């Protein structure tokens, strides 16, 4: 479990202040109900050190500030952060100003936690999802979702997939912060637990395959444009995406064979 995971949640900014040196945000990451097949992260299991990087749109190349305070609780993680006011003109100042204004005017309404599971700090649930009991919190990102309290996790994942594909990276496994108001997956109703039919599964994995293929192409295109070979990070990204693509192809092959063998799964 050394893979970098990400947990998305709605961003509730309680307060935003500024002075001559910085913008200051204070808020709490709360959680919508996990969707089916989702994993759960226990906020109280977080291990972290401050200050922590505050990133823009989950890109390690685009830092916008630092997380200066965080206190995990059962229903989420209250936090404080700062975005420095850069005096010199340039990309950094433009990026931070964009981030600050996007938060102020509610155009950015979500945060995403980048983390790794600690050894023996997770367990499989009956649903097939993973419960992360103890985890290392590495970074917090400001990310964009529709400014709607009813925005679904499907909206979040679809948008993040587009953002990552544009930068040549793959979509990580998506997990959800556990909160007091969230229904544990193992306690879902039978209606909520109804599996997708075979054709929906095929369409879902075809979409995943397309995203992975686009990620591979973007990684290679970037290096080709710059006239160089892949760097270490790009090699890891490429190899991970290629491995997952192979697994998706194998699974699609099984699904298509099953669709021909037993049409009853279509209903």
Image (tube, grey):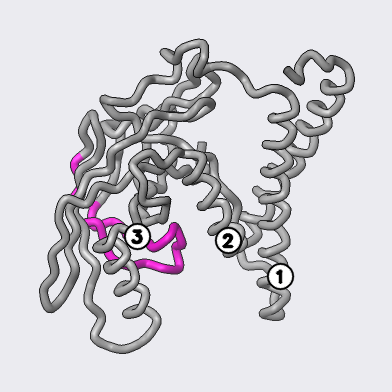
Q: Position of residue 197 (x, y in %)?
A: 69, 22
Label of residue 233 in the image: 2
Q: Examine the structure image and report whether residue 64 is included in the region drawn in magenta.
A: yes
Task: Return the x and y of residue 71 as percentages of the image width and height.
Answer: 18, 41
- In the displayed structure, 76 sits above or below 243; it is above
Q: Nearer the viewer, residue 151 or 71?
A: 151
Residue located beneath label 3 in the image:
107
Q: Residue at x 34, y 30 (%)?
A: 178
Q: Give the dominant element type of the magenta stretch: helix, strand or loop.
A: strand
> First in sequence: mark 1 or mark 3?
3
Viewer-nearest of discs 2 and 3: 3
Dots 1, 2 in contact, CB < 8 A: no
Quadrant location, the C terminus: top right
Give neighbour class at mark 2: few <14, some 14-19, many 20+ (Cα, 10 Å).
Answer: few
Identity of the residue drawn at 45% across and 44% down? 6
Residue at disc 1, secondary structure: helix
How many C-alpha atoms fall within 10 Å of the one at disc 1: few (<14), some, or many (≥20)?
few
- As measured in the structure, the alpha-carbon distance from the residue carrying label 2 to the one carrying label 3 is 31 Å
In this rendering, the answer to whether 29 lies above or below 267 is below
**Residue 221 shows which numbered tag?**
1
Q: Is residue 34 inside the magenta stretch?
A: no
Q: Residues within 10 Å of mark 3 (few under 14, many from 20)?
A: some
Looking at the rendering, the stretch of residues picked out in magenta corresponds to: 50-71
**Residue 188 pos. (x, y %):** 44, 15
Image location of residue 247, percent across then percent down: 73, 37
Residue drawn at point x = 73 percent, y = 38 percent: 248
Residue 255 vs residue 225: left or right?
A: right
Instruction: Say if 115 sits above or below 50 in the image.
Output: above
Alpha carbons under labels 1 and 3: distance apart: 31 Å
Q: Quadrant of residue 183?
A: top left
Give the CA separation, mark 1 to mark 2.
15 Å
């Amino acid at each position: 479990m050394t893979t970098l995971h990400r947990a998305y949640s709605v961003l509730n900014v309680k307060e935003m202040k500024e002075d001559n040196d910085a913008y200051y945000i204070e808020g709490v990451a709360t959680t919508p109900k996990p969707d089916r097949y989702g994993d759960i992260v226990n906020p109280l299991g977080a291990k972290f050190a401050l200050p922590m990087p505050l990133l823009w749109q989950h890109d390690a190349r685009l830092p916008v500030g630092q997380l200066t305070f965080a206190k995990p609780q059962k229903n989420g993680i209250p936090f404080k952060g700062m975005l420095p006011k850069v005096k010199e003109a340039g990309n950094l100042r433009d990026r931070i100003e964009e981030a600050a204004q996007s938060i102020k005017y509610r155009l950015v309404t979500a945060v995403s936690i980048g983390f790794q599971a600690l050894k023996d700090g997770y367990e499989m649930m009956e649903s097939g999802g993973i419960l992360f009991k103890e985890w290392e919190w590495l970074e917090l990102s400001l990310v964009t979702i529709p400014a709607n309290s009813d925005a679904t996790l499907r909206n979040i994942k679809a948008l993040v997939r587009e953002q990552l594909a544009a930068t040549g990276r793959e979509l990580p496994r998506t997990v959800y912060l556990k909160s007091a108001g969230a229904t544990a997956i193992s306690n879902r109703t039978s209606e909520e637990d109804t599996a997708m039919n075979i054709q929906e599964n095929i369409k879902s994995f075809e979409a995943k395959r397309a995203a992975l293929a686009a990620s591979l192409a973007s990684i290679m295109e970037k290096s080709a444009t710059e006239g160089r070979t892949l760097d270490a990070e790009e090699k890891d990204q490429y190899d991970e995406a290629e491995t997952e693509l192979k697994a998706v192809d194998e699974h699609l092959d099984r699904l298509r064979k099953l669709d021909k063998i037993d049409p009853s799964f279509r209903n």
